[in-house]
Amino acid sequence: MPCVCSNCEAGCGLTAWVDKKTMTVRKYMGNPLHSGSRGRNCAKGYAVESQMYDPDRIPFPIKRAPGSKRGEGKWIRTTWDEALETIGKKMHDTLKVGDEMSKKLIMYHVGRPNENGFSGRVPHTMGLDGFDSHTNICSAGARQGSIQWANDDRNSPDWANAKLIFLQSSHAADAGHYFQQSAGLIADARKKGAKMVVLDPRLSNSAGIADLWLPVWPGTETALYLYLANRVLHEKSINGDDLVDHDFVKNWINWDRLMANKEYLQFMVLKGYISKVPENDSYESFIEVMRELYAPYTKEFVVKECKLEGYEYKLDELFDIFIDAGSRIATYLWRAGPIAHRGGWMITRAGFLPLALRGAMRGDIGGVSWHHWHEISVGGKGDKATVAGKKPPKVDVWNELAWPPEYPLSTYEMSMILPHLLMDEEWQNKWRAKGLNVPTKLSVWIPRMYNPVWINPDGFRWIECLKDESKMELTFNLSPTWSETNWYCDYVLPVGLAGERHDQQSAPTKPERWTAFRQPVLRVAMEKMGWKPKVEHRGTLEAHMKAGLGEIWEENEFFAELLCTYVDPDGSLGVRKYWESAKTPGKPVTVKEYYNAAFELLPNLRKAAHAAYPGSEYPCYEFMRDRGAWTEKTDIYKPQEEELEFDGTYYHAHGHKYHTDDVTKDEFGVLWIVDHEGRMRSIGVDIEGKLHEGFHTPDKKLDLFCEWLIDWKWPEYALPIYPRNEREYDKMIHIVSQVHHRYMKADNEYALNTVYRLPYNIHTRSVNSKHLMEISQNHNPIWISTEDAKKHGIKRGDAIKVRIVDTVSNLESGYFIAMAVPTEATMPGVLACSHHAGRWKLKNAVDIPGFDHKLGIMGVGAPLYEMTMDGKVGTLKPKEGIDKGVKSRPDTWQFKEFNKDLDNIWWDGLSGSWQNAVAPVHPDPIAGNHAWHQKVIIEKAGKDDKIGDIYVNYENNFKTYKAWRDDLTRPLDSSDKERRPFWIKRPVVPLSKKAYEVDIKDI
Ligand code: SF4
């Protein structure tokens, strides 16, 4: 049975091999019909089987025992029906009030979505501004840089045809976003002779096999990218030609707007960026401006700034490789730097500059394009199958808990400070007095496959907030496994893993548009063998119960029934119609109806499906059910150059037509219309007499010059820039990393590199996959360079105390005790400890009244710990290793056939620690993301300290959150009439003009 891996965002195809006699999955392999993954998977893909038959899998819905407190660990068994009824009533009562506030009190907090649109449809159909993603702890810095250049969420490289694979960190080649598919394509390119360059303070697997590894001080990469730009601007090729691709830059970069803005050019003079305002606004003058602007980023500057002393020759090698690749340079500037630092977004912004100058951002063969062109999103568009028959209107309210007024430009929701905002009455009162209707609580908080207590910074703050029932009145996690967060929820509702749920998933992994269809493989197998569910809209739940997997459901069927039958039973809230079946009114829409309607939206798929399944009621559904993957379009290159048709009366653009009377052209050749909300929107651009669709920016070009940053109070960053001297470090503090070497004074002060992903860990869900845990063992040592280790007398295996200190508030957060591993694989001055390990639990198992077996908790993945917390200080201490915990119960009551080898578990998991809890939140003042890296002070551990111990002063962490918020941001004020630039989408759920409008009182 085909399905899709759900263990990261890549969405690789899987095929489940189902044993028809036992109705179990014997193995998961790749799906060769999936043109993105091409039949391949990483270790996490094959490990889906051990996740599926996890001995500690939650077998049925559980609920906090009546009378117990959150976190006490007392649970009772409940039913899906009871959960639907209780939760549905609470949501109904909240929405029934019908005022603005009621639309802010339900929050759907999505971890890794691994689907394209369904999760956003849930709050959207309720009219809520109530979606929180995990993105601001994940990749929002990189997305901000991409939005600034192209108003596109992320770039999309053509790895396979590149001549240079240009990587910052291990992402793409050996871990992280889309890595398995990217790694295969990168290998293809290298086979054809492509070079690979890796910038990373850590010798990752990718760096180890690269042609060139540059260990750059974390957070200073911007300087290096501007150095490349400087050389491209000033030097010539061996033929004496300019290195700048003038044809591309002149036509597709918005240099003309910079040259037309004399006031800004004057500002640049005042700032010392350039010496004088150019005499004219010609392209040639622009190039002169660029040359002057980037001239200070010399080799000497970069060597000092990036701490590359001794590696000067590598910079020359880098430049030669960069130039030799021409415009065939592929990159994916993603997690690592951009999410690790204050101003990390500028790393992405500056990183694209030398590529743009070389023409590599044209979206052509072997270069860089943008994700919108390569990704298919129809998962939220099955509306035709519902009574409503169309999508819901835009949402009319703005939720300050998702988008506080301090962060109007935040890339995604400020979800990592949700508990801080909920508990910060001073902040709430301040903005209420200024006229904003700020929520003080949530009525329902719904994490979906998310574990913020463990993975977010300042975990004790999350626990405090979750424990406070006046702040989060009802909570339920849709979660296939146990997690640290589940421990503090009211309900844990077990939903399916990769082969146990329906989702449409697509990812921009190559220059084509593919989509895959995740599905519950046992259900599909049983249906093919003649089985039918008694209740069609509960087919997945019934199938899993019948097959002995447990009472495991899926979000799609759950939400359709919850919202149709329980939240809005009589349709009076206007929600029901979006979830009620058009075919069988009165019943929730079924997954077959929904996904058939969604896939019908893809013309080529529709044609193929109707031809393959003539006369079928659900041809598109059946087509995807049997193939699991489809490629709608291949070879998508230079889509911005797509010509815009004009027939003499109408302009035809993006599938719409616009009457010539309604279209105006500005002095830069951009075609504008007024949309139904009364806003100017561009539809195309005239370049040298030809009309093109252009990029997604309002000016339809790549925005070297982000003019809008001037209006939004950040004029100094409207161009890619980096401080050049001490005075500018202070002035431009917003783009100087909190772990810059200038903050490291004593010889035991270090930058801690936290954000690298281990290819065998999956955020939170891998915790009890025994195959993955056998590789990772919850092992989380701290890397220290041999030179630094020698200096401190630290040997391999020594326990060291790692104290985290904030460089804005100057407060100490506490410490974690880590196991030191001296190595040549991290640069001197920089420690490395991935934040993807260090799991814990507070009980080995729980008793469920009336149930014969104990429910084990993360038995193969998390050691047992003891916790204390008093509202100010929290501690965690290891108590028992994984091996001992499993030995005390070597047998399992469920999935015995798959778990005969539990007595082989040898790892204790005690070499990791929960560093995330010690880290305070660092909200970037512009991109809004958490800047992950930390300044640390190390010392040898005391005699009573054990590896894994943590001590957290989370009262100090709260002060640090306030310092970053109040000392670094430029909040909305009475001069602002909108909450955010309207053309930068609020991701996921569309908001109306009314929602964007704001009126702030001066007080
Ligand atoms: S790269 Fe991601 S989606 Fe692909 S097999 Fe690995 S975990 Fe699964």
Image (tube, rainbow, N blue to C red):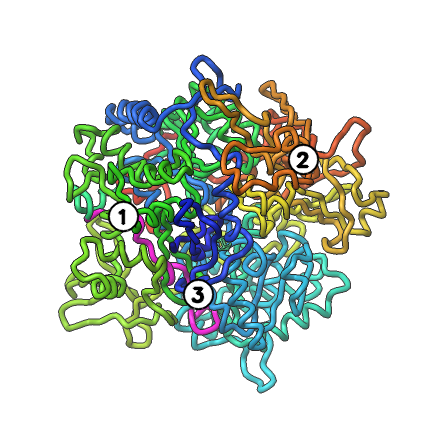
Q: Where is residue 315 in the image (x, y as percent from the top left)?
A: 68, 68
Q: Main secondary structure of the magenta part?
A: loop
How far is disc 2 from disc 1 in space, using C-alphas? 44 Å
Callout 1 secondary element? loop
**Left or right relative to 285: residue 394:** left
Tell me whether the residue at label 2 lies in contact with that at label 1, contact meaning CB atoms closer than 8 angstroms. no
Q: Position of residue 817 (x, y in %)?
A: 72, 34
Classed neighbour count for the residue bearing mark 2: other residues with Cα under 10 Å, few (<14), some (14–19), many (≥20): many
**Left or right relative to 779: residue 425:** left
The residue depicted at 67 percent of the width and 67 percent of the height is: 212
Amino acid type for the residue under numbered disc 3:
Lys
Name the residue carrying label 1: 530
> Which label lies toward us, 1 or 3?
1
The residue depicted at 73 percent of the width and 55 percent of the height is: 825
Tell me how many marks there are.
3
514 and 962: which is toward the camera: 514
Callout 2 secondary element? helix
Q: Position of residue 528 (x, y in %)?
A: 30, 51
Q: Which of marks 1 and 3 is nearer the N terminus?
A: 3
Name the residue carrying label 3: 510
Callout 3 secondary element? loop
Which quarter of the picture shows residue 580?
top left
> Which label lies toward us, 2 or 1?
1
For the record, the magenta segment spans 361-384
* Residue 164 versus residue 618 in the image, above or below: below
Q: Which residue lies furthest to the bottom in this view?
A: 239
Which quadrant holds the C terminus? top left
The residue depicted at 21 percent of the width and 35 percent of the height is: 576
Residue 262 seen from this side:
no
**Left or right relative to 666: residue 279:** right
371 falls in the magenta region: yes
Amino acid type for the residue under numbered disc 2:
Asp
